[in-house]
Amino acid sequence: MKKQILAMATACMVSLATQAAEVPFVTLNNGTKIPQFGLGTYHLAEGDEAYHSVLTALKNGYRHIDTAHAYQNERSVGKAIKDSGVPREEIWVTSKLWPHEYGKPEALDKMLQRLGLDYIDLVYLHQPIGDYKSGWKTLEQAVKDGKVKAIGISDFDAKDELFDDILASAEIKPQIMQIECHPYAQRKHWQKRLKEAGIAQENWFPLGGRESNGEILRDKTLNEIGKAHNKTAAQVIIRWHLQEGFIVIPGTSNPDYIKENIDVFDFELTDEEMEKIRALDKEKRYFTMPYEQQVEFLGSWQPAD
């Protein structure tokens, strides 16, 4: 009897651990709904680090995982998704094509194989480098073939001309654009442009990223607001992203931070607090490589298959 009770309790705990958190959704311009909050896997090494981070996230209610071919951890991400016990249809999976794959339909098939999935919810062109128009045609065809649900562009904020060029030639308009954005670089210009174009905004480095050395997390205003809600500065920042309508994907391998970052749905920032955070904007970005240097440096590198 005791063994039966223990088995039932354990099963109940597993069930509770894999329930989705009450994360809101953003409806994209093709009608697809994306969870507004997720886990970014940039810097998570292939193998145990990426695998356990994604598994921990899914066990704590995350249902949105962002990876990329360039991160070289898609296999670990896919394995964690499979091992989590969470139904595939409940998990939003994002990946990204690297420039050397643009225009190559087989690149999507290889991505599906690395992830171990039948379809991918969202695929980005990772950089506005190389033959990105041909890359976009590849993604459009992947949508038509049912391999991908939504398609987007990443880092096309390097120049307005790049953004304008991809939109002018697109048969299927991008559903989403991913850019660096946080309280110190709120990207007002791109907020306006994306809203006008009907394209959702997803933010990387939402807490500043490793390159910031935690500068934003030490901000006095953010910590004061956090104290008022019994929350950390990181939770305040994530809440700000959500209330601004952004899609946000903070990344970490620390299990405590993974749990902390999703614990943001039991409080709300006041209008006054939102304005205080907006006032912190100084367009201070932490990724500062000039576009011409990106073309030379990033364009010459290729991730392994």
Image: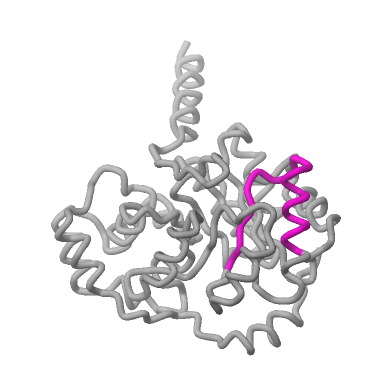
Q: Position of residue 212 (x, y in %)?
A: 41, 78
Q: Magenta stretch containing residue 141, yes or no?
A: yes
Residue at 26% in and 42% down = 266
Residue at 45% in and 54% down = 247
Q: Nearer the viewer, residue 169 or 98?
A: 169
Give the quarter of the image for residue 228. bottom left
Residue furthest top as drawn: 1
Q: Position of residue 278 (x, y in %)?
A: 25, 68
- Numbered range of the magenta stretch: 135-154
Locate residue 241 relative to residue 70 in the image: left or right: left
Locate residue 79 relative to residue 32 in the image: left or right: right
Locate residue 240 relative to residue 47 in the image: left or right: left
Q: Nearer the viewer, residue 145 or 299?
A: 145
Residue at 72% in and 49% down = 115
Position of the C terminus by quadrant:
bottom right
- With respect to residue 297, does 270 lie above or below? above
Q: Position of residue 253 (x, y in %)?
A: 50, 60
Q: Magenta stretch containing residue 142, yes or no?
A: yes
Give the quarter of the image for residue 190. bottom left
Residue at 84% in and 56% down = 105
Q: Position of residue 5 (x, y in %)?
A: 45, 16
- With respect to residue 222, does 172 lie above or below? above
How many labels sit on residues?
0
